[in-house]
C-alpha cells in the first residue's frame, strides 16, 4: 500500500542520531532516518499546564517507512460495545508492549531519540508503541484523553509520529472551549505533555478525500 502523498515539506536529509550521541547522529535504515528533535520543534503552550511540541519532518524517508509498516505490521480490527451494540472501531491497530520487538528498526531508534530528548520531563522514558492504520478519511478516533495509568492523575508525555496522508489532530479543553488543530504531515512528530491527558481531549476526526495514514504513539509504561 502506498500513501500516494508527499512527505512533510520539512522532510529532512540530515543524518540521524545514534543511542550514544548527544546531538545529531548518524543512524538510519536505508533511506529512512530519524532527525534530532531539537532542530525545528516548536512548543505550543496550552491553558491549564498542557503543552504540545510539533517537530515537522522528523523522519526522513517517511513514505518508505509507511510502506514497510503497512505491509509488515499484523494489523487487526477491534470491536467496542456501545450501549447494547457491538461496533467495529474505525481503524486498524497493533500494540507493542515494552518487551515486544518493534516492527521496524527505525521505530526503536525513534523511541530512543524521544527518551533522550525528553529525559528531564519524562525520566522513566517512552516504553510502549501503539500503531493505528487509518485506511482513508472515514477512519477516525473520537475525543478522548489517555487516562489509563498515570495519565489520569499525573503529568505525562505521549509522542505521536504521523506517516502517510496528512490528517488533523484536534485538541480541546476537557471542560469545553475552542479546539486547537494540528495538521500532521508524513514524518511529523507531535508530543503532548504537561497536564494534556488530564485537562484536554484529543481526536482525529473523519474527513473527505484523505488517503491512508499510520499513527505511531509512544507512551510510558502503563499509560493508555
Ligand atoms: O491518530 C493519532 O495520531 C491519535 C491516536 C490516538 O489518540 C490514540 O490512539 O489514542
Image (cartoon, helix red, strand yellow):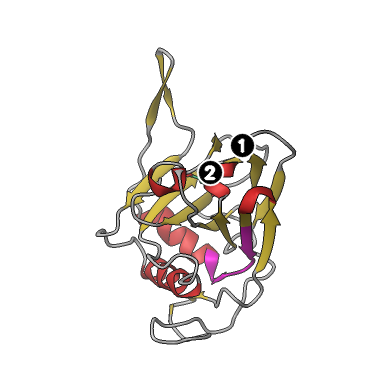
Q: Residue at x 55, y 57 (%)?
A: 193
* Whole-percent x, y for residue 206 in the image: 62, 36
Q: Position of residue 201 (x, y in %)?
A: 58, 40
In the rendered image, residue 124, in percent from the top left (x then y), is placed at 37, 65
The disc placed on residue 198 is: 2
Check if residue 71 falls in the magenta segment: no
Q: Is residue 173 above or below residue 128?
A: above
Q: Is residue 215 visible?
A: yes
The C terminus appears in which quarter of the rendering?
Answer: top left
Give the mark nearest the N terminus, 1 or 2.
1
Q: Tell me: is circle 2 under 8 Å from ligand 1.
A: no
Residue 1 makes an appearance in the image:
no
Q: Which range is magenta? A: 52-62
Which residue is under mark 1?
Answer: 174
Query: Is 61 within the magenta?
Result: yes
Q: How many marks?
A: 2
Amino acid at each position: 500500500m502506498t500513501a500516494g502523498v508527499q512527505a512533510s515539506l520539512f522532510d529532512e536529509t540530515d543524518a540521524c542520531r545514534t543511542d550514544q550521541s548527544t546531538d545529531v547522529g548518524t543512524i538510519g535504515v536505508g533511506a529512512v532516518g530519524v532527525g534530532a528533535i531539537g532542530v525545528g520543534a516548536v512548543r505550543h503552550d496550552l491553558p491549564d499546564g498542557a503543552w504540545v511540541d510539533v517537530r515537522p519532518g522528523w523522519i526522513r524517508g517517511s513514505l518508505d517507512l509507511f510502506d514497510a509498516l503497512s505491509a509488515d505490521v499484523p494489523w487487526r480490527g477491534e470491536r467496542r460495545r456501545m450501549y447494547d451494540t457491538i461496533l467495529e472501531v474505525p481503524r486498524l491497530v497493533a500494540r507493542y508492549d515494552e518487551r515486544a520487538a518493534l516492527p521496524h528498526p527505525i521505530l526503536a531508534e525513534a523511541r530512543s531519540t524521544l527518551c533522550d530528548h525528553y529525559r528531564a520531563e519524562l525520566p522513566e522514558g517512552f516504553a510502549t508503541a501503539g500503531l493505528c492504520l487509518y485506511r482513508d478519511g472515514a477512519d477516525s478516533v473520537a475525543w478522548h484523553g489517555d487516562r489509563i495509568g498515570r495519565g489520569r492523575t499525573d503529568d505525562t508525555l505521549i509522542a505521536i509520529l504521523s506517516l502517510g496522508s496528512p490528517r488533523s489532530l484536534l485538541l480541546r479543553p476537557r471542560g469545553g472551549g475552542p479546539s486547537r488543530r494540528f495538521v500532521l504531515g508524513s514524518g511529523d512528530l507531535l508530543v503532548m505533555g504537561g497536564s494534556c491527558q488530564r485537562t484536554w481531549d484529543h481526536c482525529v476526526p473523519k474527513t473527505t478525500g484523505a488517503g491512508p495514514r499510520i499513527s505511531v504513539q509512544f507512551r510510558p509504561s502503563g499509560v493508555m
